[in-house]
Image (cartoon, rainbow, N blue to C red):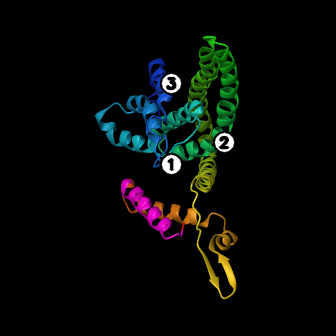
Amino acid sequence: MTDKTTKTEIMDKTTFRKIFWRSFLLQGTWNYINGAGVGALYMILPFIRKLYPKPEDKPARISALKRGLAYFNITPALAPFPMGIASSMEEQNKNIADFDPSSINAVKASLMGPLSGIGDSLFWGTIRVIAAGIGISLAKAGNVLGPILFLVIYNIPNFIARYYGLKYGYELGGDFIQKAYKNGYMKIITKAAGILGMIMVGAMTFSTVTLKTILKFKMGSMSFDLQKILDQIMLGIIPLTVTLITFWLIRKKVSANKIIVLMVILSFALSALKIL
């Protein structure tokens, strides 16, 4: 490992503040292609620019930008933590010759599900409800402190989680990765993170892609419900098939807009034919 670029030179106070404030724009360009991937890249863009400032760094910078655009979806308040780890790993990727760049997105993907489960329960299901209860009760009584307290109670934990998530994600991430490489654990961690990430993607596909057939048919005196038959084979087989076909089209370089238009046309056609 070479120390041409140290952590203190890259993640200075100015860069830290830029990433912190940009984290509030994470979902500004949320879409069904890469989730909050654009916002995640925008968040750590100052760090990448500082990591690769020279003209000869352009190929490495482009690779880092492409990695930053990968699918990303997480409770916004907890996003700085995995992005801090990702920033630290990007730095390790520059400084360690045999670093595996694919491990960066593998670790990010593996953290999305567990952290979202915690974050959604804590911020959406607990803090927001408590803040809204206090704010609404005061607002109903005509007290101007109602909306103010709602914003204060909800946003103080939000700010704290973002600030310290970014701080410790970056600090702990780099130290942990260095130790993992020295001990030979990095390949195991990368593989495990990749498997966990794929499990989370599969779970998200099952829960978000809802597609069922209403097709029924008769054979003699017997009546068959095609959806029940498919469920006996494997639950979610239609959403899985559609997802795999979509993935295949993406691999074939078919644009996302064309895929979306195709899906809309097929949905209308199959619905009109009373198949879906």
Viewer-nearest residue: 265 or 101: 265
Measured in 3D between alpha carbons, the distance from the residue under mark 2 to the one under mark 1, in whole angstroms, is 20 Å
Cβ–Cβ under 8 Å for marks 2 and 1: no
Which element type, helix, strand or loop, lies under badge 1? helix
Label 3: state its secondary structure. Answer: helix
Q: Which mark is residue 114?
A: 2
User: Of helix, strand and loop, which mostly describes the magenta segment?
Assistant: helix
Residue 134 or residue 186, whichever sits in front: 134
Whether tag 3 and tag 2 are in contact, CB under 8 A, the answer is no
Q: Assess whether mark 1 and mark 3 are in contact (beta carbons under 8 angstroms).
A: no
Q: Amino acid at mark 2?
A: Pro
Read off the residue under disc 1. Answer: 102
Secondary structure beneath label 2: helix
From the viewer's perspective, is the residue at label 2 or at label 1 nearer? 2
Q: Is residue 165 left or right of residue 49?
A: right
**Residue underneath mark 3:** 20
Label 2 vs 1, first from the N-terminus: 1
**Would you place residue 171 above or below residue 201 in this image?**
above
Q: Which residues are magenta?
A: 257-275
Q: Quadrant of the C terminus?
A: bottom right
